[in-house]
Amino acid sequence: MKSLFSLEGKTALITGASRGLGKGMAVGLAEAGATVIGAGVSEMTETKKQIEAIGGTFHALKIDLSKQGAVSQLIADALPITGQIDILVNNAGIIRRAEAENFQDDDWYEVINVNQHAVFQLTREIGKHMLEKGSGKIINIASMLSFQGGLRVPAYTASKHAVAGLTKSFANEWAGKGVNVNAIAPGYMETDNTVPIRENAERKASISSRIPQGRWGTPEDLKGAVVFLASDASNYVNGHILCVDGGWMSS
């Protein structure tokens, strides 16, 4: 059974690995044995420190996925490190908040470019390498807003709906070719993205009251999900959106 969940000898590329959910998943992948390549706009010192503390290997690549040509540069930098990418975790994402009637075009395009377009490009390009060797695991990070509308986040909601759709679309084409494409939809998590919500006492209380498990999630809560979808344990799982939400979607 242990071998089903082992990532020994595998290389994982994860975007947005500097903090929050990305850091938590990067550490989880390393704990399962993977060599981890982290990509992000911020320094990944703490991620590297935690992974090396458990005897793992972490390579940091500084990249801004909102910039033109960033995806091509990331792939060119990442592939030579071990010569292979066995696992891709499309985690990087941004959020902009404003009332729908006041939401600006610049904010719309920035969010869509990072959260949707970069996911499409990375999946397509890394997927080509996985198809060549006949195996690979791609894990996109969706959201509760892949299913719901949210408030004051039209671009984020649209992008996360798109992530769910892209996950299913790629899975339909690649499932029979050895490449699994799935997604994790985190519930309400204690991260930088949710600080504005958690600072609003009324809004936080309203959300908390609807979570059956009685608490908000943490980055550590995604470790098991990402290792499962990255490992042989999920070989017959394709196009699935795995909710890690404390029961939110069932409430």
Image (cartoon, rainbow, N blue to C red):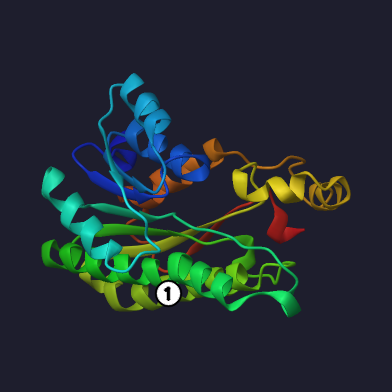
Q: Position of residue 213 (x, y in %)?
A: 73, 43
Residue 198 visible somewhere in the drawing: yes
Looking at the image, which residue is at 45% across and 44% down?
Answer: 22
Q: Nearer the viewer, residue 135 or 35?
A: 35
Which residue in the structure is indicated by mark 1?
Answer: 166
187 sits left or right of 70 in the view: right
131 sits left or right of 227 in the view: left
> Looking at the figure, which quarter contains the N terminus?
top left
Q: Is residue 243 above or below residue 176?
A: above
81 sits left or right of 97 in the view: left
Looking at the image, which residue is at 70% across and 42% down?
Answer: 216
Q: Is residue 174 above or below residue 20?
A: below
Q: Position of residue 27 (x, y in %)?
A: 40, 34
Q: Position of residue 230 (x, y in %)?
A: 34, 50
The amino acid type of the residue labelled 1 equals: Leu
Looking at the image, which residue is at 33% across and 34% down?
Answer: 30
Callout 1: helix, strand or loop?
Answer: helix
Q: Is residue 46 above or below residue 180?
A: above
75 sits left or right of 51 in the view: left
Name the quadrant containing residue 88: bottom left
Name the quadrant containing residue 105: bottom right
> Looking at the figure, which quarter contains the C terminus?
bottom right
Mark 1 is surrounded, within 10 Å at the Cα level, by few (under 14), some (14 to 19) or many (20 or more) other residues, namely many
Residue at far right of view:
202
